[in-house]
Image (cartoon, rainbow, N blue to C red):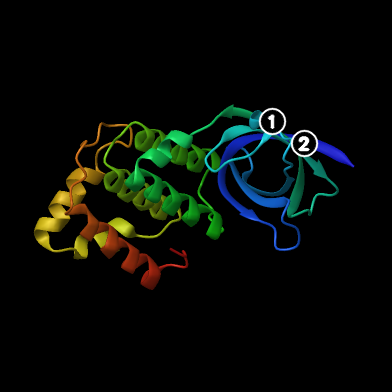
Amino acid sequence: MQFQEFRGYVIHKAPSASEKSISRISILTAAQGIILGLFRETKKSRASSSIDLFDLGEIVVKTRGSNQDTFFIQEFRLERRHSDISRNYEAFTYACSLSKLLYRNNLHPESTEDLFLLWEKSLQHLLNGYAPSVVYLKAIYLLVQQEGYPVKEAWLKQLPTKLRESTWALLKEQLHAKADREDPPEHQESIERLHQWIRKETAIII
């Protein structure tokens, strides 16, 4: 039996179906993509060794072979906790939607590091109070594009003229560019239309 260390974000946490004291954890890493692990928590566990949704930290996992799909998490070293995001309902909701898209799909971006950085930047924008719908729209657009789907050519161009122009003006900005502090309601239509297109034209589960 060997041990390996990974650094990443917790993008999903749920109780194990077989034992309540064990949680199923999905961790997004820059080097390995998404790692699935089992973690046992006790009432005596320190806050720094517990695992919460959106935590950034280092995990130590037991490995038994190269074909192992799920690992047992031996240790978790908390680097940064992002519990403040729950104070903003919309930001938390969109962060959950984005993380759900990641762990539910077997995404194959050109680089796992790109996927990691996209999530990290999106999470930081949400934590910093930028418009949640704008951050989310730009994130899923880029994710679909990284997967190789013609989202610009096939989805964006078929939008009504005014919506297409306003959506493209937003999307062409770099992800790190400052977003509006107000959450524009018109961007919800773009999100809904993009969701519909993804469900119809791709294998990605929303």
Who's the residue at 33% across and 47% down the image? 90
**Label 1: how many Cα within 10 Å (few below 14, some 14–19, many 20+):** few
**Label 2: how many Cα within 10 Å (few below 14, some 14–19, many 20+):** few
Q: Is residue 179 above or below residue 21?
A: above
Answer whether residue 150 is visible to the viewer in this image.
Answer: yes
Q: Position of residue 58 (x, y in %)?
A: 66, 31
Picture disc at residue 46: 1
Residue picked out by circle 2: 4
Between marks 1 and 2 in the image, the one whose residue lies nearer the viewer? 1
Left or right? Give the position of 6 relative to 117. Answer: right
> Which amino acid type corresponds to the residue marked 2 in the rendered image?
Gln
Q: Position of residue 133 (x, y in %)?
A: 28, 48
Q: Is residue 199 above or below residue 55?
A: below
Q: Secondary structure at mark 1?
A: loop
Who's the residue at 31% across and 50% down the image? 137
Left or right? Give the position of 128 relative to 21. Answer: left
Picture disc at residue 20: none
> Which amino acid type corresponds to the residue marked 1 in the rendered image?
Arg
Left or right? Give the position of 198 relative to 170. Answer: right
Q: Residue furthest top?
A: 79
Which quadrant is home to the C terminus?
bottom left
Q: Quadrant of residue 17?
A: bottom right
Q: Quadrant of residue 190?
A: bottom left
